[in-house]
Structures are given as structure tokens and as C-alpha cells.
Amino acid sequence: MSKTLGAFYTPQDLIKFIIESLPKKNKNSHLSILEPSCGDGRFIRSLLTHYKNYKIHIDGVEFDQSTFKNTKLAFDNNQNVSIIWDDFLSFRPLDKHYDLIIGNPPYINKKLLTGEQLTFLRNILSYNDISLLADKNIWTAFIVKSVNLLKDDGILAFVLPLELLQVKFSMYIQNFLKKSFMYIEIYAFDHLFFDTTTGQDTVVLIAHRKHYSKGISIKDVAWNNNKIKNLTNTHSGFKDQENTTLKWSSRILSNTDLEFLTSLSEKFKPVSQYIKSKPGIVTAANNYFITNKDTINKYKLKNYTKPIIQKSIFLKDAVLFNFDDYLNIQNANKPSFFIDLTEYKVGSNKSIDSYLSLGKELNIHQRFKCKNRTPWYKVPLVEPGEAIFFKRLNKHPKLLKNEDRLYTTDSAYNITCNVGIDINSFIFSFYNPLTLIFCELNGRRYGGGVLELIPSEFKQLPLPYIKVSEEYFHKFSQEFSLKENIIDILVNNGREILKEHISIEEFERLIFIYKKLVKRRLDMKLFYPLN
């Protein structure tokens, strides 16, 4: 595994799953196959076994010279395999086209590419009339170039990051795929196959130039003991994806459900019409600039600290947060002190100078954002808002009234109401099934069921705003703290919020859709039973 090369070797069980998911081929036909980032040759070995009674030839391209030499040596005696040392971005197979292109493209952020590689990537996108906004990662170019190398009836089978279904720049690749293929299968798993620091989920894409079906088929795969436990199929045509911000990851829902949700959401203004939001404090080194009371006492930093909320897991499941709640975090010795040295001058306090020296020993001062500060330890403050929304969520979104205006890190968005909007009413209105459904549809899923909403996704959420009194909000807050799960809140309060807009049957449909989406993400059968 190499971060720079983007090499995350594919587990054998996943390779077996992909190859066995390919359509049957006529044994009399000659198959030409390409593996554009062949690594140690594990895909090639499995293909040779699977197609042992077929006439095949496999080209494997590998960029890393050391890996290339070892893989080439392993297949030197096999006339059906050619291992080629090249960068796939510049690879030119002399007008050759393939029946099958298969593999696990490298996952490399463009910041880690060489200037030459980035030029190749952008040239590939430009040649295919794809916006250069899709240049964020090398895997996009691997998809596009591979499509160009397929025969008219060829198949593309790739392991790809879940980004394909979720992030904004992927929409350019999605549109390209829709134009290039008759039928697209996407397999999404409840299992994290790669032990990466990002916890990035993966999907399998199998795209057919020609097929007896048309459209997109999203298949949810329950994976247990290295094999399929259950497979749920949802079919969707291409046409409904045009002119919509809904992501391919929403395709677990039927077209009628998506049309129902889209039509209902258009009745309401987005979150951005009610509030302004901005991320909290970016320290560039939370473990250094945010610490617990033991460290504060050790280095006598108390007079240079501000109370801060670092993580949502430190907070109770409520819609109110105040200084008493903060003190509970502090007394549990959790990181809750933000070290604010904005006004400090080096040399005026030995203990603080000692802490700054520790920072330099840890190379904190050399981090990108710190290097661009003068001095490096001067962290820009972001004023607290009336409420806090945590961009990453697990069971359900966390939106809390920040009663005592405590600071947050950029794990949260600080919310300030627009003129005429009441923060209590905004929070109350947020917890309805429609808004929470669109959190699921708009957000980006990570390993372990974590969902993240970037600022633009949060601001686009439809919100059926209604005004409530202080007393009513207080009652709501108590009910929220005592709830068994979020469904209780959505059922009890969601009807009040949406009663002027939908029937009881439609409301029950919303609740069912929400349960279905969350169950898919978390697989919480007991938490959200579908009945």
C-alpha cells in the first residue's frame, strides 16, 4: 500500500466477486483484456483462472518500476500476458481496443501528482469535453481513458471510491458514463474492504457498452464472511438524473420515491434562506492547540485559553448546549481548552515558551497553515454562532442551540439566523423527516456509517420552517433529551411541521423512506425496524 502511488491492493474475495459478476462469454471468442494499474498481478491471476478455457490475452500496465519488474518476472513464461512499464495516463496501445478493462485504479489526490501527470489528467478530461473541475483525483482520468480504449461492445469493471456516487465533481464523470454506456451496474457494500486512514468506502462499477437492459442498477450488497449474504437491487433509468442535485447514492430509492421527494422539497426554501453558517476554528493541529485540563495545569496555560467544543461525541444527544454541559466535558478531562496565544509575546512566560518549544519539536510550526501564520501559533478566531451543526453525523444530525456562545472547531458549522428568523424555531423545524431524508441523500458516506455534509450540501437542505414559542421549544427540548430514538421526534413533531403540506399517508411514506436510508447506512435493524 502506498499513499503516493495510490496503491491499495484489492482483497482476493472482492476480485472474485467482480469477475464472477461479469457476463458469460462465448468460449470461441478471443478476449482482449487490459488491467491499467496491475500492481502485483492479482487481478491477472484471477482472470487467467476464470478464463482458463478461453482464448485470451491480458495487457497489464504498471507505473512503479520495482513492482513492474516483480510482476513481469512472475508472468514471463505466460504468452497470454504482457506486463508493460508505463504511466497509464500516457499509455498508447497503438489503436488497440479491449473487450474488458478491469482493475482498481489508483486513488491519488491531484495535490500529490507531478506536474506532468496533472497535465495528462487534464488533457484526458478536455479531450472528452469533461470539465476540469473533475481533476480532483487521478481515478477520474483512469475511467475516462479506459472508456476510450473499450470496444463498441466492451465492459468496464472497476473498484472505485464511494466518491463516484457522492461528491460534486463526480457528476461530470457520471454524465460521461451515462453517454458512454447502455447499462451501468454499481455494487455498494456494507463492508469496508480497505484499511485506509480516510475510512473511504468503495463501490464496484461494471459498465456495459451493449446490454439487453438500459439505465443504472444500484445493488446493495450485504457482505459476511467474505461472501454475499444478501443483494438488494434497485433499477433506475438515466433520464431522471438530469437537472437534479440528487446523487447516484440516492438510487436505493425508486423513481417514484425520488419524484415524490423532489416535488415535496420544491415547496420549501433551502436552509440558506434562513441562516448563515461558517465553519469553526481551524487550528491545523487540534491535538496541540486543543487540550485537556491536565496539560493546561502542567504548562500554566489557563489565562490563555478559551472554552471550545472539539468533537460531537463529547456532547449529549440534545438540542441545547450551555456552559454547564461544557464543564461536564472539561471535568471528564476531555480536550476542551483552546490555547489562544494571539496576544502572547515569546519570552514573557517560561512555561508557555516551553509549550511552544514542544510544538516545534513536534514540527507543528512546519504544517502548511501554521507556516502561513505570523507568528505560527496565532490561530485565527471564528466567532461562535447561535447554534452549532456538526458536519459529520452517525445516527442522526446534531443541531444544538449554543446558549452560551462557546467556540467550536471546524468539525461544526456556526449558525446565525437571518433577520426575522428565530433560532429556536429553526432548530425545531429542522427535525422533520423531509429535511433529514435530504441529509441522507445529499451527504457523503464514509466507513462505519458516518455521513458528512459539506457547507453547500447543508445549505441546500429543504426546510419547512414554522415558528414556535419559547415554551413550546422548551417542551421540545425535554422530549428530545428523553427520546428513545430520533424516529420518536420525527413522528411527534414532524406531523406538526408538515401537516399543511402532505397527507397522513404521505407523512408515513416519508418516515418509511427515512428509515430505509438510515438502515442502509447503519444497518441498524433494531434501531430502525422497517414496520
Image (spheres, rainbow, N blue to C red):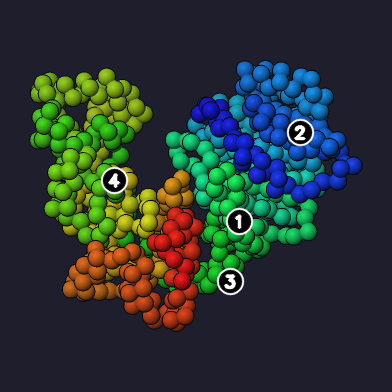
| Residue type beneath disc 1 | Leu
**Residue depth check, mark 3 versus mark 1: number of the one nearer the observer:** 1
Give me the C-alpha separation between circle 4 and circle 3.
38 Å
Q: Residue at x 79, y 41 (%)?
A: 99
Residue at the spot of label 4: 311
Q: Earlier in the sequence, mark 2 or mark 4?
A: 2
280 or 181, nearer to the observer: 181
Q: Residue at x 53, y 72 (%)?
A: 260
| Residue type beneath disc 4 | Lys
Q: Residue furthest toward the right?
A: 28
Q: Are marks 4 and 3 in contact (CB under 8 Å)?
A: no
| Residue type beneath disc 3 | Thr
Query: Could you tell me which secondary element the residue under label 2 belongs to?
Result: helix
Image-based side of 289 in relation to 302, left or right: right
Query: What is the number of the mark on residue 231?
Result: 1
Residue at the spot of label 2: 48
| Residue type beneath disc 2 | Leu
Give me the C-alpha separation between circle 2 and circle 1.
27 Å
- Quarter location, residue 239: bottom right
Q: Earlier in the sequence, mark 3 or mark 1?
A: 1
Percent coordinates x, y for residue 309 in the rendering: 23, 46
Query: Could you tell me which secondary element the residue under label 4 belongs to?
Result: loop
Query: What is the number of the mark on residue 256?
Result: 3
Percent coordinates x, y for residue 117 in the rendering: 60, 28
Q: Earlier in the sequence, mark 3 or mark 2?
A: 2
Q: Is residue 233 above or below residue 285?
A: below
What crowding class fits label 1: few (fewer than 14 Cα within 10 Å), some (14-19), or many (20 or more)? few
Image-based side of 275 in relation to 145, left or right: left
